[in-house]
Image: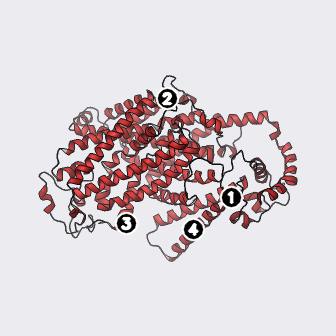
Amino acid sequence: MPFTFDYIFRKKNLDNDLLEKTQLSRVLGLLDITALGISSTLGSGIYVLSGAVITQYSGPGIIFSFIIAAFATLLSGLCYAELGAKVPRSGSAYIYIYVTIGEFFGFIMGWDLILEYVIGVSASTNSLSQYINSLAGDKIREYLRNAIPINIRSLASYPDFLAFGLAIVITILLLVGVKESTFLNKLFTVFNILIILFITICGAIKADFKNWSVQADYNQTYLSNLTNYSPPYSCSAESERCGKGGFIPFGMNGIVGGAAKCFYAYIGFDTIASAGEETLRPKRNIPLSIIITLIVVTILYCGLSLVITLMIPYHLLDPNIPLPQAFEYVHLTWAKHVVSIGAVVSLSTCLYASMFPLPRIVYAMSSDGLIFGCFSKILPKFKTPYIACIVSGLLAGIFSSLLDLNELVDMMSIGTLIAYSLVTVCVMILRYKPSKSSKFFEINKNISMITLKEGKKLKNRSVVGLVFGESSQSIFLRLFKPNSDCSVLTSRIVNIFCVIEILAIIAICILVSSTINFHFYIIIILALLFLIVILCMLVIWRQPQNEEITTFKAPLVPLLPTVSLFFNIYLIMSLTLTSWIRFFVWFGLGVIVYMVYGVRNSVENTNQNERNFLCPCMTKKPKQNFENSVQNEEFQFEETSFQ
């Protein structure tokens, strides 16, 4: 079977009737998936990340960093909400891209998400294991390190059997059923939120607003409040490591740098989208839960971070254990135990929520025939993809127990940011794509197919017609004053200008992230690229949208997706070369799997072959007859109907 580009851009066909059918159990309500989103987002970041951002980036101004990061995340969240309501299936970004862009890109996205979630689960499992080990006085670590040492580069110093066991426990919870396991997750999530509120209130009692006006001439007067504590580093008037003092000690660059760091604290809300096939009333509940999750998490992040900076001067804070050390500073030693309990609960719920979407991605890809079919088998009693759960749990357990995860975390960031970027593109494509129920869909589709595949054979075809499709309107009118009805021809214009916009944004982000001195010619190039982006947005905005979409719609399209693309692509460019090399190695393995197995075993490939077998009219010879009818009748019909 010869390989053509048709396989790359072959799209998954999801009719309205098919969207409602599933082998999984639709039992998750709004509260269930909101708790899932909060627990996946409100993880270790609130106990660790806040300390690093305060001491190294934002100082007390961390609230601005969290707000900027929350706004950027909300842009992607609204795009996820629109697609989650329109395509409520398991698979999250994988299924959105498969439906919108094509099979190959959907497979690569799913392959990428598998690695992302495996690393995320492994990191959460490893963090929880290390925290439990620290509560036990490092006895577990010392015993295993002495008994079974591993002296291999890029591997852990010892096999962490505790982390492996935690991964297996979470796998068992996922196997026993979604409703049962999410009930336990809701309890843990509520308990975690109550602990955070309790910590915030207790810390606010000891607040001292003088800590927001500490100057750069640091001394040891603050240390008199402590008994057995030395700061992680000392500051002096000559040192810039602690900034200039005050509420924003590191300036606006620190706020923006802190926002980029805080952005990763919000990674995880896409877990909600992965549960679309098991959600009750997904068209309503998925958008609501995403928005509620981001609002709740932002409030908790900002509140707790502000309290920390009011309890202790930011330059004395230990970035690794900010909360216990802050309470020790204000002589609330008993609160350290509450913090310890909260950390264990938070990491446990984060681990469950991180593991939840992984088998759903594997199940969705297996159901589509892109990976081995055994992964789509369902456990009849609990209606869970048991083989996908078991294999995912074992893989995550092996990763967390044997690998050094510090070198792999950036790969998870690459996968997440690429997913966010492609989802925003999918929103623009789907918003301007005509429904198959439209009376103009088949007419314009056939005209487009003939123009693309047989343009050289048709008479009086211009280059513009070959690119944008034939129409009686001039190119200027088609771009800026198009007809009022959404069609395949207007959708093609949107697709072309989306590609141009993405390339321009990538060029801008590469120049900005790699240029130290902005010379005159660099500024001219950037100005031209920005003009191209603005022109693309204007053309896309002028095209008619699909008015038949009745589900949740993200506002300010195409402005909102464009701003989201800028932020995501800029963060992608800031990642290390080593992470990119590892990512492309995994990417290469995915391409091999797709070429060897996915292309021929794809369900859409089977359906396409069946349609061609049952409809011999789709051969080239009859198409020539149809071509004549299109030329004689359909263009005239377009002139009278679209104007």
Task: Tell me which residue sits at (57%, 68%) in the image.
Answer: 529
Location of mark 1 (residue): 493
CA distance separating discs 1 and 3: 39 Å
Residue count near mark 1 (Cα–Cα under 10 Å), binned few <14, some 14–19, many ≥20:
some
Q: Residues within 10 Å of mark 2 (few under 14, many from 20)?
A: many
Comes first in the chain, label 2 or label 1: 2
Q: Which residue is mark 2?
A: 384
Q: As drawn, which residue projects farthest toward the bottom? A: 520
Residue 3: mark in rendering: none
Q: Secondary structure at mark 4?
A: helix
Q: CA distance from mark 2 to mark 3?
A: 47 Å
Q: Quadrant of the N terminus?
A: top right
Secondary structure beneath dot 1 equals helix
Q: Amino acid at mark 4?
A: Leu
Disc 1 residue type (three-letter): Ile
Q: Nearer the viewer, residue 47 or 516?
A: 47
